[in-house]
Image (cartoon, helix red, strand yellow):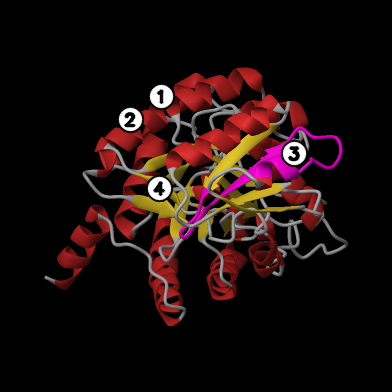
Amino acid sequence: MLVVMQAQATEEQVRAVCQKIESLGYRPHSMPGAQRTAIGITGNQGEVESGTLEEMPGVQEVIRVTKPYKLVSRDTKPDNTVIKFSDSHLKGSTVTIGGPDLAIIAGPCGIETRDQAFKTAERVARAGAQFFRGGAYKPRTSPYSFQGLGEEGLKIMAEIRDRFGLLIVTEAVDYESLDLVDQYADVIQIGARNMQNFSLLKRAGRARKPVLLKRGISATLEEFLMAAEYIMSEGNYNIVLCERGVRTFADHTRNTLDLSIVPAVQRLSHLPIVVDPSHGTGKRNKVTPLSRAAVAVGADGLIVEVHHDPDRALSDGMQSLFPDQFDALMVQVRQIAAVLGRNVPITSDSRAEVTSSTD
């Protein structure tokens, strides 16, 4: 069920409706919109008796939501969700995921050393990325592969945020790592292998930070949205969806990047969606073309693997761009975004680079 408040409803009236829903044994989820507030109801096994709610002051109507995913649906929140980041590390500026600005997330697959991470961070910041991605915990197919530096890697990324003003996106693989990622990072990533780890999704829903949820390796659109619903049902409404390719019969790429899911998600859900062309293709020479396509199809951002020396990377070197290739990608992405009325913000580091290159 969904309670739609009147445009002029007061905060007190919204609070009273939430308290009434709680008194009925359900859980309210207040989601303010541009024109009015909607209150989603979860925890009900059957249809909620709407009569008492419809009569409350400030209520416009009570709607039955038929989709299995309720909180992520546009039925609950017609306006696009825009996640805003603003703190001292950003030097007074505000960074968003969703809205007219494209979010650019870039960095190595894994944090290997402080020197490696800082060299890559310097280049992606200079090119205009707002977020730095890097794995401190690496769920690998082989138990003998590089598994990440753990908390040491998180500390290195925290230093990078202080030095370059980049917001940190990194993966949590279990309860213990999620607690640490929540402490150090700005965005908690839930990887494809954990998209249907429902206990981990619920724990992420109780975290303080936004969550970047990657699509599972063979997940349908509904399964993808239901995974996000698990997180939202616990009270965390700041979720970014990520298309990273699905497993098919194709063998010319690591995965098959399904760009058609971007407009499909945007039709059904208010959540922003970004695209990972690195895992989606697994081939360095395909990352830039698919990045261009992702922006053209309407994605809210990109998550791209970049390494200062990818031939010696401990993980995913074959799909990691050289810094010069990332520079060229950013130029092209800005041009395509402008055609669509969108923008890739110029950061202080990238502005300095543009100035120096024209001197």
Q: Which mark is residue 84?
A: 4
Regarding mark 3 in the picture, which secondary structure is present there? helix
The boundaries of the magenta stretch are 32-53
Amino acid type for the residue under numbered disc 1: Lys
Q: Amino acid at mark 2?
A: Glu
The Cα–Cα distance between marks 1 and 2, rounded to whole angstroms, is: 6 Å
Residue 71 disc label = none
Q: Which residue is mark 1?
A: 155
* Residue name at image x 55 percent, y 27 percent: 207
What residue would you read off at disc 3?
A: 193
Residue lying at 51% horizontally and 27% vertically, measured from the top left: 181
- Which residue is under mark 2? 159
* Residue at image point 59% right, 37% down: 17
In-image side of 320 versus 173 (left or right) = left
Q: Amino acid at mark 4?
A: Lys
Q: Nearer the viewer, mark 4 or mark 2?
A: 4
Q: Earlier in the sequence, mark 3 or mark 4?
A: 4
Pick whichever of labels 1 and 3 is earlier in the sequence: 1
Residue 21 forms part of the magenta stretch: no
**Could you give the CA–CA distance between mark 4 and mark 2, rounded to whole angstroms?**
21 Å
Mark toward the start of the polypeptide (4 vs 2): 4
Percent of width and height locating residue 3: 64, 48
Which quadrant of the structure image shows residue 359? bottom left
Vertical placement of residue 285 versus 209, above or below: below
Q: Say few, some or many: other residues with alpha carbon within 10 Å of mark 2 (under 14 / 14 to 19 / 20 or more).
A: some
Q: Secondary structure at mark 1?
A: helix
Label pair 3/4, CB-CB below 8 angstroms: no
Vertical placement of residue 94 versus 79, above or below: above
The reply to whether callout 1 and callout 2 are in contact (CB within 8 Å) is yes
Secondary structure under badge 4?
A: strand
Asked which quadrant contains residue 43, the reply is top right
